[in-house]
Amino acid sequence: MTVDPDDPIERPAGEGDEPEEGGRGEEEAPRPLGEEEREGVEADLEDLGSMRGVFEAQGARGVVIACSDCGSNHYYDWDLLKESLEHMLETGEPRMHEPAYEPRETDYVLWDYGKGYVDALADAGINEGPAVTLAECPWCQAPLEPTFTYCPRCGRPLAVIRLFRELLARGILEHEARTLLIKAGFEPFD
């Protein structure tokens, strides 16, 4: 009987199990990224954090990246892409992931759009996310997360409180700031 060396069923155990030329065996150390590649991945991580700070508060679940290799869009939740980029920094290899199951495109921000948007904010001197954080709702004292735009208990908008605190930080007297906001149509608050 002749053994076909290319047939894995007929090949004797252990033969042909070596990685192909250019491949990596399991025992080999990861290939570190070059300096330029590392800087690019670190910049992507920073951009991702900026985008998340801006778009997650608006309900975005993550980013969509148009793949130049396969021509498809790849949908990444915020944490998944962050972990993938961190994995790439540690190992030098991209992490495989399962494609999103029937993603709603409107839940994701196009990477290029998001990057341009946060760059424009930075160019205008506007920092990412709400600069004024709130620990609790001034109306009902419900605890708040930094990304909340409305109180989860009473439903009131929190932008007026952030605006009020920003006006105070810029030197406007409290009475004048309250009067200005009430004249603008905002509900009085404590």
Image (cartoon, rainbow, N blue to C red):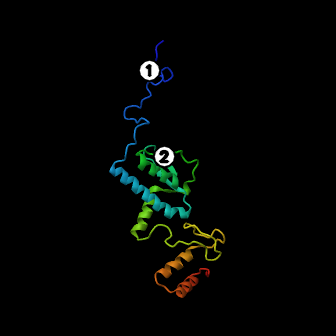
The numbered mark at residue 26 is: none
**Which residue reaches farthest left?**
35
Q: Residue furthest top?
A: 1
Crowding near the residue tagged with mark 1, few <14, some 14–19, many ≥20 C-alpha atoms within 10 Å: few
| CA–CA distance in space, label 2 to label 1 | 37 Å
Q: Is residue 77 visible?
A: no
Q: Secondary structure at mark 2?
A: loop
Report the residue marked by disc 1: 5
**Quadrant containing the C terminus in the rendered view:** bottom right
What's the residue at 56%, 72% (across, down)? 134
Amino acid type, label 1: Pro
Residue 44 x %, y %: 42, 55
Q: Which residue position holds label 2?
A: 72
- Residue at figure coordinates x 66%, y 72% from the top left: 154
Residue 178 in view: yes
Q: Is residue 152 left or right of residue 10?
A: right
> As displayed, is residue 127 above or below residue 89?
below
Type of amino acid under label 2: Ser
Residue 42 at x, y percent in the picture: 40, 55
Nearest the eye: 157 or 29: 29
Residue 149 pos. (x, y %): 57, 69
